[in-house]
Amino acid sequence: MGKEGKGNFQLKTPKGTRDWSGTDVVLREQIFSTITSVFKRHGGVTIDTPVFELKETLTGKYGEDSKLIYDLADQGGEICSLRYDLTVPFARFCAQNAVQNIKRYHIAKVYRRDQPAMTKGRMREFYQCDFDIAGQFDPMLPDAEILRIVKEVFEELPEWKGKFIIKINHRKILDGIFQICGVPTEKIRTISSAVDKLDKSPWDEVRREMVEDKGLDPEVADKIWTYAQLKGGKDVVEKLQGMPEVVANESAKQGLESMALLCDYLEIFDVMPALSVDMSLARGLDYYTGVIYEVVTEGSAPPASAKDVAKKEKKQKKSADPDEDRSNDPTIGVGSVAAGGRYDELVGMFSGKPIPCVGISFGVDRIFSITKARLGTAQPIRPTEVDVFIMAFGGGKDFTGMLPERMAVAKQLWDAGIKAEYLWKTKPKLQNQFKAAENGKVPWAIILGEEELKAGKIKIKEMGLPEGHPEKDGVEVGKANLVDEIQSRLKGKASLPDRTTA
Amino acid sequence: MGKEGKGNFQLKTPKGTRDWSGTDVVLREQIFSTITSVFKRHGGVTIDTPVFELKETLTGKYGEDSKLIYDLADQGGEICSLRYDLTVPFARFCAQNAVQNIKRYHIAKVYRRDQPAMTKGRMREFYQCDFDIAGQFDPMLPDAEILRIVKEVFEELPEWKGKFIIKINHRKILDGIFQICGVPTEKIRTISSAVDKLDKSPWDEVRREMVEDKGLDPEVADKIWTYAQLKGGKDVVEKLQGMPEVVANESAKQGLESMALLCDYLEIFDVMPALSVDMSLARGLDYYTGVIYEVVTEGSAPPASAKDVAKKEKKQKKSADPDEDRSNDPTIGVGSVAAGGRYDELVGMFSGKPIPCVGISFGVDRIFSITKARLGTAQPIRPTEVDVFIMAFGGGKDFTGMLPERMAVAKQLWDAGIKAEYLWKTKPKLQNQFKAAENGKVPWAIILGEEELKAGKIKIKEMGLPEGHPEKDGVEVGKANLVDEIQSRLKGKASLPDRTTA
C-alpha cells in the first residue's frame, strides 16, 4: 500500500461538514453537559432515533425546505432520508409507540443541504439539543417549564448570563391579528412567513413582499405593521387585551388569555426579566399551533438589560452586510440560538391521534461559536483530563529509563481510578518528559529516581509552580502511600477539563 | 391535518435500525460512561468526524465488505457514503491534519447494509466505541496500553468481571507460519481469512474451504492445523520460539519477539490472566500489520477461569444452530464484543506518509445486549434522575391545588440544582401525585399543606419506606431550611440512575 495511494484522494470532509477535535470538542462537550444537566433536573429522559428515517416519514413536514433533505441512494429495499431535525422523528416515535406522555431530550446531529457558513456555525451536518414535552396537561404548565429550562440553560452556560432574550408570541394571537387586519384566510401562513422576516429585513422590504409578491392589499399590510411593532413584557398582552377589536376576535382572545396565564407562571419561575413579548415573531414552520419563541443574543458587548440587548441585536441585524456569510464575526447574523413552540397536531399526522406537544431546540453549534468567541483566550481549556505524568530521572550512560517502574506506578494509579500517563520511550530524557506533561497541561508529576526508589521514596511535584515556591522542586513521599498522597492532592481541585495549572 | 394522515404512513424505523428509549437507553448511557471514563484515565481525547465521508475515502478499505456501504443519493455536488467504521475516518483525519501523535477515542454510530439480527445486537445502524493511538513510539508500549484499557473496561462494566478473554495473535507470526507451511505468497490473505473462521466452523469445514475453494495443497492445510491449534499464555510464544523451523523464518521470529515483549509489559499491567495467545485468530480486515486481538465472552454462566471460558465459548459456537439469527439468546453467536490491532499503513494510503497506529473497537450494542441479559431484573434502573416530587395535600371542595406554591418550591429547588418535578395539574389528587412519583421511582416527596405552610412548615417524606418505619409519614421541616434539608438527605445517597427506592 502506502505510496501508490498518495495523491489519489481528496483529503477533506464533505462540503458543509467538519471534524471536531482539540479544545473545540472539549468546549462543545462542556456545553452538552451543561444542557443535559438542566434537562435531567426537569425529569428529562433521552431517546435515540436512527440518523435516517423512511423518506415518507419526512415528506410533507417542512414545506419549501424539503428540498434541503439528504436522501440515501436506492440500493434496494426501503427509500430513506437523513433526518432534517429531531422533532419529526420524535413525533414519529410518539405515534409509533402510542406514547401518552413523555419529557424527552435528544442531542444529535441533523442534516440539511443548505449553503454552509462555517464561521457562524451554519453547517450541513450540525447538532441539535431538543427538549420536548408530549401529553395532555393543564394549560401552559409544560410551556412554562420549557421556558424555565431555556432560562436555566443560558444562565448556566459560560458567558451567557444576562446576554440573551427570549422572544415570545402565540400563533392564535397572530392569526387573530391577521384576521382583524383583513388578511384572507388562505394567505395567513404566507403573510406570517413574511412577518417573520422582520428580524432580518426592514419593514419596507417586508411590506413590498406582502404587497407585490403575495398580492396583499397595501392597507392591510400597514395595519399589520401597527401591531407587529408591539413588544415588551406582560404590558403588551394587557395592551392588546385593552383593544376592543382584538378581544372581539375569538382566536386573539384565547391566545391572549393563554399568554397572560403563561406570564403569571413565568413570574413565579423568575423568567419574565429575560422575556420579550414580540408581535413580529412568527416562526417559519407550519406545524406550530400555540406559543412560539426564539432566543436571540447580543454580540460580545458587556452585559446589558434585556431591552438594550433587543435594541442592539435588532440594529446589528438591520445593518448586516448582505454578504454576511463571508464575515468572520461569528456573533453577527447567526439568527436565533434556540427556538421552539407548541405543536399539538404533528403526532396526529402520523397516527391520526393528536398528542399535544411543546418543545425547544438549542442550536448548539451556533451556541458553541458564540461561546468560543466570548471566552477568547481568557480561559485556557485543558486538552485532556490527565492528572498525573509519571517520569523517571537519571543521569549519564547508566540510566535505565526505569520503564518497568514507571509502568508499575501507572498501573497502581489506574487501579485507583487516577488519570495518568507516562512517556512511551524506554529511555526518555527528563526534559522530554516535562515537555510532554506541559503540553498536556498535566497538573502533577511523579518523578522516580533509582536511589530514591531504593529508599522507598517517590517525588511528587506540582507543575507550573513559580520560582521560589517552597515546593517548586517537589516533595518526597513514601512509596507505600503514593496513591493516598496523590488523591488527597487532587481532591482540593476538581478534575475538570477547564482547570488550568496557573 | 390530523385524520387524513392516518394510515398513509408506515409507522416504523428503517430496516436494521431501532429507537432507543426507556431503561435501555439509561443502561447504554451507563456503558458509554464507563468506557469513556477508562479512555480519559489513559489520556484519551475525543474527535468527532462527519457521519458521511466522500465515497472515495472509503473505497478500497474494506475488501468484500464494501458492498455493505450505504451511499447517499447523488443530489448534485460530491458523492458521499455513510461511514462503515470509525477507523478509516480516523486515518483520513490523521492524514489530513498531518497528525504526529494522538490518543483519540470516538463513540459514534456506523452503518452497514448487513442482514440484521436484533436480539444479538447486530444492526444496520450501531454504535462503536473506538480508542486508537497514532504515532511513533518505542515497540509494544502503545499496544500494551490498549490491552490494559480493554481489561479495565470489561472489569468495570457491570457483570463482566472474570467473564471475558482477550484472544491475541500477531500478523507477522501468522504470515511466518503460512510461509513455513508452504502457502504461496499470493494466497496468504485468503488462507488467513479461512483460518479466521475457526472460531465459528470446525476444522473439517475450514480445511475443505482451503483445499477445494482456494486450491491449497491438502498437506499444506494439515500443516497449518498443527500450528492453529496452539493456544494458551506466554508459553505458546515460548513453545514457538523453541521450534527451529519457526525462528528460522524472519517474519515469525520478529513477530514472536514482539509478542514476548508485549507479554512482559502485560505482566506488569496485570493483563495476562485475561489473555489467550491463540494461533487460530486471524481477523478479517486487510489493514492489520502487527498484533491483532478480539474479546470474547461466555454466556451467562457463573464466573469461570479464562480457559474454561474459552472452552465453553468454543463449544457454544460449534453447536450453534445454523438459524441462530432467530435464536433469542443474545449471548450466543454474537461473535467478538471488541476487536482491534495494529495497522501501520492505513494512514499512508491517504497521505503517502504512514503513521503507525494501534487501536480497539468496542461493539457497544453487543455489549449492551449481553449486559442487559446478565443483569436481568435484578437491578431495576431508574427511568429518570429526579430526586424530589413536590405535592400538595388538601381535602374537600375548598382544595386550591396550591399550584403557585408548588411551582415556587420547584423554582427554589431548581435554583439549587436539585432535580425536581410536580404534577402539571391545577388541582391534582394526592393519590395521583404519589402515583406519578412512584412511576418515576422518585426517592423523595415534598408535601405541601395549607395549614402547615401558614405555620412555616413543609413535610419531607422518603418514598417506599416500610410500614411501621418511624418516618413512614414523613418529617416536618422549616420552610426556610427546605433546600438544606433536602440536600443533606440527598447527600448520603448518590443520585445515580441505578439507585432504587427499595
Image: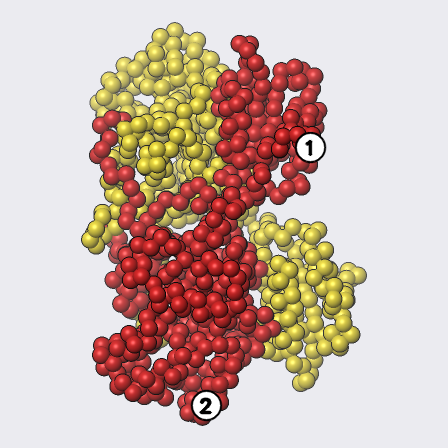
Chain colours: A yellow, B red
Host chain of mark 1: B
Q: Give the secondary structure at mark 2.
A: loop
Which of A20/B224 is in front?
B224
Q: Are marks 1 and 2 on the same chain?
A: yes
Mark number for residue B243? 2
Q: Amino acid at mark 2?
A: Met
Q: Quote the CA–CA distance across marks 1 and 2.
A: 72 Å
Q: Give the residue at mark 1.
A: B484
Compared with B306, B404 (above or below) is above
Q: Position of residue B84 (x, y in %)?
A: 33, 59
Q: Give the secondary structure at mark 1.
A: helix
Specify the quadrant of the image occupied by residue B123.
Answer: bottom left
* A487 sits left or right of B88 in the view: right
Compared with B69, A291 (above or below) is above
Indicate which label's residue lies in the foreground, 1 or 2.
2
* A109 sits left or right of A386 in the view: left
Residues marked 1 and 2 touching at CB (< 8 Å): no
Q: Position of residue A283 (x, y in %)?
A: 36, 29
* B182 sits left or right of B489 in the view: left
From the image, which quarter does the N terminus of chain A lie in? bottom left
Residue A81 appears in the figure: no
Residue shown at 37%/66% (left/top)? B317
Q: Position of residue B497 (x, y in %)?
A: 54, 43
Residue shown at 64%/42% (left/top)? B493
Host chain of mark 2: B
Q: Amino acid at mark 1?
A: Asp
Q: Position of residue B48 (x, y in %)?
A: 43, 55
> How many C-alpha atoms fall within 10 Å of the one at disc 2: few (<14), some, or many (≥20)?
few
